[in-house]
Image (spheres, grey):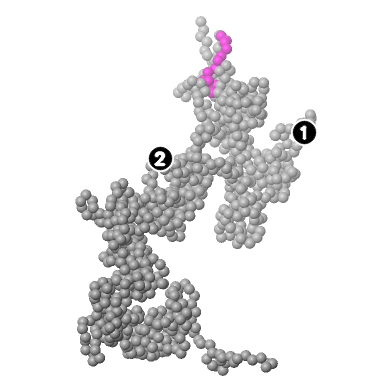
Amino acid sequence: MSVKKPSPQWKKFQPSVQDPAILSMHSNASVVNMNVNAEIQPAVPGGLPRVRETGLVDKKQKFQPSVQDPAILSMHSNASVVNMNVNAEIQPAVPGGLPRVRETGLVDKKQHSYGFIQCCDRDARLFFHFSEYSGNIEALKVGEAVEFQMSFDRRTGKPVAVGVIKVDPTLVSPEILNEEKVQGTIVQEAKIIKQKNGTLPGAQDGLGRVTYVHNGECFFLPYGLEDVVGSSTPPKTGEDVLFQIATDKRDGKIRARNVESLESPSQRFAGVVCSMKDTFGFIERADIVKEIFFHYSEFKGDINELVLGDDVAFGIQIRNNKEVAVEIEHLPEGTVIFEDIAVEMVKGKILKMLKSSNRRPSEALAGRIMYETPKGLIEIPFGEKDQRGECTLLQGDTVEFQIATDRRDKLQRATNIALLEETFDYSGDIRETGIIAALKDGYGFIYCAERDLRLFFHFSEFMDLTYNPRLQDELQFTVDQDPSQPTRQVATRIKHLAKGSVSFIKVLPAVYIGTVDKEPSTHKNQGKNKEGEPGNIIYDYEGTIQQIPYFLKDVTDQNNLPHFGDKIDFHIGELKATGKKQAVKVRVVLRNIAGRCHGFVATIKENYGFIETADHEKEVFFHFSSFNGDTNDLELGDEVEYTLARKSSKVSAENIRKLARGTIPADEILREKGIVQGRIVRPMRIVNTDQEEYCGLVQITDEEGNNVGDPLPYGITSLADKRDFLQKDDVVKFQVARAKKDDQLRAVNIGALRKFIRAKVDSVKGQYGFINYEAEEGKKLFFHMTEVHDGAVIQAGDEVEFVLVQNQRNGKFSACSLRKITDRRRPERLLSRLKSFSEDKSIWKVIAIRNPKGPEDGKGFQPRSPWSSPLS
């Protein structure tokens, strides 16, 4: 019995068109034509050649090939993928088989229940059944783009398309188009060839040829009439043209596309100037994602008027095998639009933040945001200029944004990105509060409620771009490290709060009763403590006397402020930043009626003064802000009512109210004693501030100058002229009065018996001046305008009479009780008006610098003679 040897198995070898060896041999050819029918004999293991044998057919039956058979796989190797979709889902073809790859193609043919797909990424045409299409098969047209997976028919073993879906046609192309344009010459025109039946031919009929030079070598590429653009007339033989090179992904063939004649009217393009150097620049094109070079000489107009961001129109020429922009013209602003921005706002989360580095990022759109759609979660990129404002964004933040789609390459990105407040509900940020303490140009400082610190902030960190910050505005923010100064903390992600939202004090619920021991200052403090000096409250806490400060702002009713000795109730507040305690919600319970005092205005300075008590024993300081009325109405000797308040370590007058003259009972004058003469033995303290006693003393003297009796006290009300500056040893005349309160004798209506000196005014400088009188060697005599009587206007050269006085403290001389010597006295109505004028510098004042001259250089005009009629 003879043994039949199996017949040798032969298979066809299909070399890949991407084989470097094959491509190198045919590098000058645009089409690679390989003989794929050559048969080779495989070797046996070990590398020895197989031996040819003979035999007889013993049995014949139908053979079902396995998809795992290497021979079958090699037979289908002509379905080699040139460019596969690497993002497609890979599934096994059969259990244990090769993985599937998602591919794209175009519907080539449709029959009753099946059709064929022409693959875009390889030279293959696959069968598909309508049951494999996910959608309405009636809506699927021939030539539309689809995506599918390749599998094998279980019955025949042939490759078929399964899982067919329709896709965007702009994403599917069987060719790879090079963006760079090449200049070449037509060597053969493309023509229209009609068949006998009158139908137009296919794309391969009537092809033309264009030649170009690259690296010293000449290449020829085919093109068709459908590849001609920019003109209705096809280019002729010998014409120079621009074109793009297209490579077929299926077989590697290359051809010319978008052929444009250089001699035809040039096509105009649009773009935006994106870069400008010394003599050249670059334009970002609106038709493709590319920048094009231009020289300043190509701009039609004044190059100084061209700035970054301008919209321009231009033509394109090839120079040195590179595209350059020519004939550049200005376009109206807003003409060039690169992208379309969707109206609706989308919510998402930041997956990847932009790197805060000074180096140029390797990727223009380095940030990533994830948002949810009906099809699932989608990532979308964003760049540096896509944020609305400059508020700090962090990974994981919830934001809202709009989707911008580039018209050139359909790339989508997120723009107008804004941080949402709901981020802070789960982000873990420690949000703090405070108020704006200072504002500068573009930045400011926040006084924190939770910590004893002033934080720097920049206006760019406000979440609301329309907000205009103001002093004392309340804010919420996150504290972060300053990137430029790691040792400094700054406020970021700032939100404006409604007034009353920020509290610096934690208020305890218990209510306490106390007495005001010291009132807070009622005028503004220009120092660091803007709240001024605090007041002080004494209260009983569990049998122990305690003290606690309070401020004017902590009083509940600002129209009913507590005063010294008033009974009040209050709460205790604890400062969040420091833990210090103070009284808050202060309210008056019972007024200290016995605390109302009476007195006389003894001294008036620029913004303060002193009040002489009703018993004439001492003086009390007061500030103009404590006077209830116009301080311009105050005059020396006016009767007032006030309360005492302890501020710092001194007692001052508050709530001052002017009284009608005669409200305070006057001392009883002893008229039987008549007018007596005496001598000042101790001036008032307003004259000599070094003495401790307030009131002055005057000694009665006889005609021979001998002392009579004890010295009598006197105060501001005792002076006949309240502006008189009585000094020690001045001779005076006065009357004697008895005080009704204690029957004490006092001197009243005191008038100085002084010698008046006459001299001329040398100069006047605002509120003071100098007189040509030398009380001290080489010095002119000083005087103040408040010493001028009757409101007279003093000018340089005026003759005045005055009294010479010496300051007891510094020994300097000055003039007081000035009277202008004039023949005519001002009317009383004018004098009263002058007294009412304030020293407000904002009111315009007129000062006569030269007297008028009449005819013949006389002083003034001559009096008119009585008028008489010429007819009389």
Identify which residue is drawn at 31% across, 52% down.
570
Identify which residue is drawn at 70% across, 34% down.
203
Label 2: how many residues lie within 10 Å, few (<14), some (14-19) or many (20+)?
Answer: few
Question: Where 245 sits versus 82, above or below?
Answer: below
Q: Secondary structure at mark 2?
A: loop
Main secondary structure along the magenta-highlighted residues: loop
Identify which residue is drawn at 41% across, 72% down.
632
Q: Secondary structure at mark 1?
A: loop
The tag earlier along the polypeptide, 2 or 1, is: 1
Report the side of 69 relative to 526 (left or right): right
Q: Which residue is mark 1?
A: 194
Q: Which residues are magenta?
A: 59-73
Q: Position of residue 198 (x, y in %)?
A: 79, 31
**Does the stretch in magenta take in 569?**
no
Report whether residue 809 is seen.
no
**Does the stretch in magenta take in 71?**
yes
Of residue 309 and residue 608, the one placed in the foreground of this image is 608
